[in-house]
Structure formats: C-alpha cells, structure tokens
C-alpha cells in the first residue's frame, strides 16, 4: 500500500504485472510512503506459494 491515498497496490492472490511494478516505481519516485513490504526499499518482492 502506498500513502497517500492509502489504497492497496497488491492483494493476496493477485498477479504481479508490469503495470503494477511501474506503479510502484512511480509512487516511490513521487515520495509516497510504502507500507507492508518486507523490504522497505522495495528492491524485491517476496512471492509465497
């Protein structure tokens, strides 16, 4: 989730698409605060199966 606006970017079970990764990069560049990732810099995303 990035704040603002506080709406989740990914939900459990959702596919990680190129568009989602681009949105995460864009939000980081704009200074949004990211909550929820294990890696605070969001250099990697853990996928659990």
Image (cartoon, helix red, strand yellow):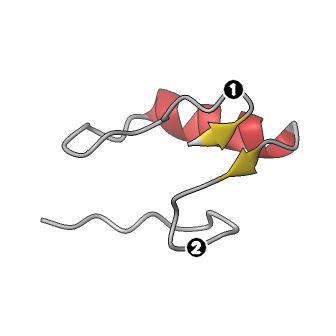
Figure check: 8 above or below 31? above
Where residue 22 appears, x then y in whole percent?
61, 34
Q: Residues within 10 Å of mark 2 (few under 14, many from 20)?
A: few
Tell me the element at label 2.
loop
Callouts 2 and 1 close, C-beta under 8 Å = no
Q: Tell me the number on the disc at residue 43.
A: none
Q: Residues within 10 Å of mark 1 (few under 14, many from 20)?
A: few
Question: Which residue, given by chain and number where applicable, does mark 2 sit on?
Answer: 39
Tell me the element at label 1.
loop
Looking at the image, residue 15 sits to the left or right of residue 41; the answer is left
Label 2 or label 1, whichever lies nearer to me, is 1
Quadrant housing residue 14: top left
- Which is more N-terminal, label 1 or label 2? 1
The one of 6 and 11 positioned closer to us in this rendering: 6
The residue at 40%/39% (across/down) is 10
Q: Residue furthest bottom?
A: 39
Where residue 2 appears, x then y in whole percent?
65, 40
Looking at the image, residue 34 sits to the left or right of residue 9; the answer is right
Where residue 7 appears, x then y in whole percent?
54, 28
Question: Which residue, given by chain and number where applicable, does mark 1 sit on?
Answer: 5
The residue at 50%/73% (across/down) is 38
The residue at 21%/67% (across/down) is 48
């Amino acid at each position: 989730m990035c704040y603002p606006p506080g709406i989740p970017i990914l939900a459990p079970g959702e596919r990680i698409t190129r568009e989602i990764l681009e949105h995460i990069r864009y939000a980081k560049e704009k200074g949004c605060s990211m909550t929820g990732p294990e890696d605070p810099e969001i250099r990697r995303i853990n996928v659990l199966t």
